[in-house]
Amino acid sequence: MGFAAFAGHKYLNLETFKKSGDGVKTPVWFAADTSASLDSTEARLYVYTVGVSGKVKRIRNNGRVRIAPCNARGGVLGDWVEARAEIVAGAQAEHGMQLLNKKYIPWKQLLDFFASFRRRERTVFAVRPA
């Protein structure tokens, strides 16, 4: 099963898991990789966050995640989908940021401007079907 249910949505609810097994849900921006169909097993969604966030620590520990389309406040708008998240770097991270910049113009650029004063590392991760 791919990510066809996410087409046309601006947010996804990302559930990452603590070492105890408890889930932590967070609404996030995402962008789909256009090189693969969303309904294929090759689909990739890119998400970025501050490098020291809890979700990055949880994904480093356990790549299993669940995702669902949602609104800005995290209200789920569809079914939950099992997926795998992987922290990416280099060209793949750059590609993910380009997709996010394109999808969320001008809001992401505005946030990036203000974030540049804080000098906080950013982490990009790719989410793929489980």
Image (spheres, helix red, strand yellow):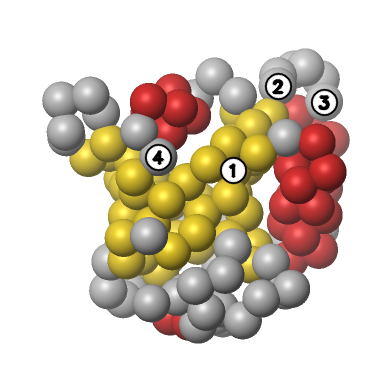
Of helix, strand and loop, which one carries label 2? loop
- Identify the residue under disc 3: 116
Residue type (three-letter) at the residue carrying disc 3? Ser
Task: Give the distance between the C-alpha atoms of the residues marked 1 and 4, in whole angstroms.
Answer: 10 Å
- Identify the residue under disc 2: 121
Question: Which comes before the other along the chain, label 2 or label 3?
Answer: 3
Identify the mark at residue 63; answer none if there is no mark.
Answer: 4
User: Which residue is painted at 65% across and 39% down in the image?
Assistant: 88
**Height in image: 60 above or below 16?**
above
The spot of residue 18 in percent (x, y) is 25, 28
Task: Give the distance between the C-alpha atoms of the residues marked 2 and 3, in whole angstroms.
Answer: 10 Å
**Height in image: 62 above or below 47?**
above
Q: Relative to 108, is 126 on the left or the right? A: left
Report which quarter residue 26 is drawn in: top left
From the image, which quarter does the C terminus lie in?
bottom left
Task: Give the distance between the C-alpha atoms of the residues marked 3 and 4, in whole angstroms.
Answer: 28 Å
Q: Is residue 70 visible?
A: no
Q: Relative to 3, is 95 on the left or the right? A: right
From the image, which quarter does the N terminus lie in?
bottom left
- Circle nearer the viewer, 3 or 4: 4
- Identify the residue under disc 1: 125
Does the residue at mark 1 contact the one at mark 2 (Cβ under 8 Å)?
Answer: no
Task: Give the distance between the C-alpha atoms of the residues marked 1 and 2, in whole angstroms.
Answer: 13 Å
